[in-house]
Image (cartoon, rainbow, N blue to C red):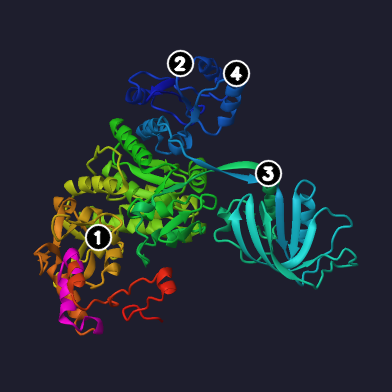
């Protein structure tokens, strides 16, 4: 084993100080992670590349190189020597080493390397196939030029809007129509575009292109769409729809970039199946009544559709923002890139190793893999770098970071959480803002202050740096060691129980704002008839019946405040009470209403409840079908006695008199016609 590598969780990790520009306290780092001395490499991507080249053929287990900028060099070398093992990379230079506080950054380096040793979970994927057919929509000459460029290698159809004045080249290899696009559905490899008033090109056109006046509406199916109309896009969040390009036709650079990407979109392409969905516990709808619509309200791409009382998530349209999963109160929608358990395992490892290495008051800096990584690079290359106690936490999309992750981060010992978002897409961060507001409200109620989760939406690296370096009066939090496993609700409760236990101002009941996914329900028992419609409507099993006797029971910890029980209740006696109950009572079943069973007036058998029978009798009394007291009395009988009573009564609703004797052929032939057997 080379002295430039340490073993972390079974992963051999090579460390380099990048020619001394990212100095590392090797003694503290080695002692913390592997209990051994370490001598970091200084130019592993260059003159010391042989260290890695000699090690890989005999490597046992995964190998990580603490460098991302030159990852291509290491990958090429590994391919040349035939290395087939796992080779990963970690960035400790921009995230820790290039900082004015690098002397204090060793605990952070240890935390980042420990996090890099965790194996990412497998993620299911969907496959999209593109045959290279392209539909170009335009209203000016650039659309013609784009069609001419792409037609040499792809199947191109050009549709220009009516009134467009275009000149076609002397020879061209694409189909052209005149019409108006009005709708688009589908995804990369399978788009359908609805077009109005299509007119075919007249080949004998002289001068400007002419089109037939005999027009009809139709649909165009294609694998790719290039929209150069310079008008409103045909889909929501066009930059997130794979295969749909909507560049500014007036920008040569933007159009050229789109043409370059289009030319490479032929063949099979894989994308992650970002979310999973369990309809059984979804709080969206029951019996035609709508409850929770959080995911529908937040989805920027329109990938979620209502199918009856359930929802359908289109994995081909989903762009993976994760807002739906972060906002889902029941855990019916879960994010797969990665799931809660892996995210919390990372958070726990970062905090644990950081503290073990002597770090204090760590701050979590949540960022995405594109905008956030570029921001960190700019801050470290041209500015002061990240503070030593600010630990970056990369996620696929910042909008996937919700209440589970935020509360767990604080419970695991992070004193503050910053979430960096791209201000150019501020409309997509409503879910994140809602989660941050709710977490801050809860923590403020426990005495931690009302600013524990902060969202940074600045585009200037200096402005971001200033916020990260601003001194804060963050409280020192007692670290929890709860295991990051279980469903969403249990993970949230584990974190909250720890924060409540060590709170500066603990309280048993904390009121929450309307719409919060935690709380209880209040029932006006005088008006409740124990019909149990609310039990059947509850998607979270918070409301339950007692099969032994008429009793309505409730478990507060399971309630998501979806409102389906309130909307379903025929007596309108249920109201919602959003709150956080930190007592054990929230975990236990409590009785909200109970009654003695009603006894059958004929046999004494218990059935139903008195309030329900009395209510039904009062409503039906005076109705024409129940004018006879004996008929109304049947409502007070059990099902068996009700049938017996109807059968024995002289007047029966289906009574039609005595059946006549059946006449046979012999009767007709013999002429035996009697008074008991009259002719018709």
Q: Earlier in the sequence, mark 2 or mark 4?
A: 2
Magenta residues, dominant SS class: helix
Separation of marks 4 and 1 at Cα, in angstroms: 64 Å
Q: Are marks 2 and 4 in contact (CB under 8 Å)?
A: no
Asked if one can make out residue 246 in the rendered structure from this viewpoint, the answer is no
* Measured Cα–Cα span from mark 4 to mark 3: 31 Å
Of the pair 170 and 175, the residue shown nearer to us: 175
Q: In the drawing, what numbered circle is on residue 375? A: none
480 lies left or right of 584: right
**Which x, y percent locates residue 171?**
88, 55
SS at mark 4 in the image: loop
Across and down, in percent, residue 446 comes to 20, 54
Mark 2 vs mark 3, CA separation in Å = 45 Å
Circles 2 and 1: CB distance less than 8 Å? no
Q: Which quarter of the image is occupied by the C terminus?
A: bottom left
- What is the distance, in whole Å, between disc 1 and disc 3 at their CAs? 52 Å
Q: Earlier in the sequence, mark 4 or mark 1?
A: 4
> For residue 235: magenta?
no
The residue pinned by badge 2 equals 2
Residue 576 falls in which quadrant of the image? Answer: bottom left
Residue 533 against residue 619 in the figure, above or below: above
Look at mark 4 in the image and give the residue it sits on: 81
Q: Is residue 591 left or right of residue 576?
A: left
Residue toward you, 1 or 198: 198
Side (left or right) of 286 relative to 519: right
Magenta extent? 624-643
Q: Where is mark 3, residue-wise? A: 266
Residue 297, above or below 570:
above
Q: Nearer the viewer, residue 536 or 214?
A: 536
Q: CA distance from mark 2 to mark 1?
A: 64 Å
Q: Which mark is residue 535?
A: 1
Tell whether 626 sits left or right of 303. left
């Amino acid at each position: 084993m080379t002295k430039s590598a340490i073993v972390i969780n079974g992963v051999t990790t090579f460390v380099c100080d990048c020619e001394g520009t990212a100095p590392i306290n090797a003694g503290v780092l080695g002692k913390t992670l592997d209990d051994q001395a370490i001598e970091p490499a200084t130019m592993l991507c260059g003159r010391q590349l042989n260290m890695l080249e000699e090690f890989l053929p005999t490597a046992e287990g995964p190998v990580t190189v603490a460098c991302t900028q030159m990852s291509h060099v290491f990958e090429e070398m590994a391919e040349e020597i035939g290395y087939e093992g796992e080779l990963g990379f970690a960035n400790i230079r921009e995230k820790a080493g290039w900082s004015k506080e690098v002397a204090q950054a060793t605990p952070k380096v240890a935390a980042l390397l420990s996090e890099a040793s965790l194996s990412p979970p497998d993620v299911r994927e969907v496959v999209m196939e593109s045959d290279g057919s392209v539909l170009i929509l335009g209203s000016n000459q650039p659309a013609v030029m784009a069609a001419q460029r792409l037609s040499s290698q792809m199947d191109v159809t050009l549709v220009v809007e009516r009134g467009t004045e275009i000149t076609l080249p002397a020879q061209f290899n694409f189909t052209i129509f005149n019409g108006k696009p009005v709708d688009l559905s589908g995804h990369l490899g399978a788009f359908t575009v609805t077009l109005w008033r299509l007119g075919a090109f007249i080949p004998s056109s002289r001068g400007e292109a002419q089109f037939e006046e005999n027009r009809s509406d139709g649909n165009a199916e294609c694998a790719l769409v290039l929209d150069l109309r310079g008008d409103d896009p045909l889909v929501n969040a066009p930059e997130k729809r794979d295969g749909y390009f909507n560049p500014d036709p007036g920008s040569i650079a933007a159009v050229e970039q789109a043409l370059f990407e289009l030319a490479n979109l032929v063949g099979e392409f894989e994308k992650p199946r970002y979310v999973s969905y369990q309809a059984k516990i979804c709080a969206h709808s029951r019996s035609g009544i709508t409850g929770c619509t959080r995911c529908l309200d937040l989805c920027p791409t329109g990938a979620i559709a209502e199918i009856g009382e359930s929802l359908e998530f289109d994995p081909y349209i989903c762009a993976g923002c994760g807002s739906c999963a972060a906002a889902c109160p029941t855990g019916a929608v879960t994010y797969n890139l990665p799931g809660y358990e892996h995210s919390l395992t990372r958070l726990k490892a970062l905090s644990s190793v950081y503290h073990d290495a002597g770090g204090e008051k760590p701050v979590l800096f949540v960022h995405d893999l594109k905008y956030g990584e570029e921001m960190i690079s700019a801050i470290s290359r041209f500015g002061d770098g990240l503070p030593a106690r600010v630990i970056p936490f990369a996620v696929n999309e910042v909008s996937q970071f919700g209440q589970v992750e935020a509360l767990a981060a604080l419970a695991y010992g992070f004193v503050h959480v910053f979430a960096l978002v791209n201000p150019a897409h501020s409309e997509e961060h409503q879910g994140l803002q809602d989660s941050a507001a709710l977490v801050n409200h809860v923590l403020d109620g426990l005495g931690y202050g009302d600013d524990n989760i902060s969202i940074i939406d600045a585009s200037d690296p200096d402005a971001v740096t200033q916020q990260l370096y601003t001194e804060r009066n963050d409280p020192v939090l007692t670290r929890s060691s709860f295991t990051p496993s279980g469903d969403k609700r249990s993970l949230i409760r584990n974190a909250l129980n720890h924060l409540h236990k060590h709170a500066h101002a603990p309280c048993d009941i904390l009121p929450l704002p309307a719409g919060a996914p935690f709380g209880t329900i209040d029932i006006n028992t005088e008006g409740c008839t124990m019909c149990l419609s609310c039990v059947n409507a509850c998607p979270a099993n918070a409301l339950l019946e007692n099969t032994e006797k008429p009793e309505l029971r409730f478990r507060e910890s399971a309630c998501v405040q979806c409102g389906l029980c309130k909307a379903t209740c025929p007596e309108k006696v249920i109201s919602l009470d959003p709150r956080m109950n930190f007592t054990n009572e929230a975990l236990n079943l409590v009785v909200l209403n109970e009654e003695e069973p009603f006894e059958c007036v004929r046999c004494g058998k218990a059935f139903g409840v008195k309030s329900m029978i009395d209510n039904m009798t009062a409503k039906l009394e005076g109705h024409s079908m129940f004018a006879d007291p004996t008929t109304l009395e049947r409502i007070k009988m059990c099902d068996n006695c009700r049938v017996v009573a109807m059968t024995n009564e002289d007047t029966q609703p289906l009574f039609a008199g005595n059946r006549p004797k059946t006449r046979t052929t012999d009767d007709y032939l013999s002429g035996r016609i009697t008074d008991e057997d009259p002719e018709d």
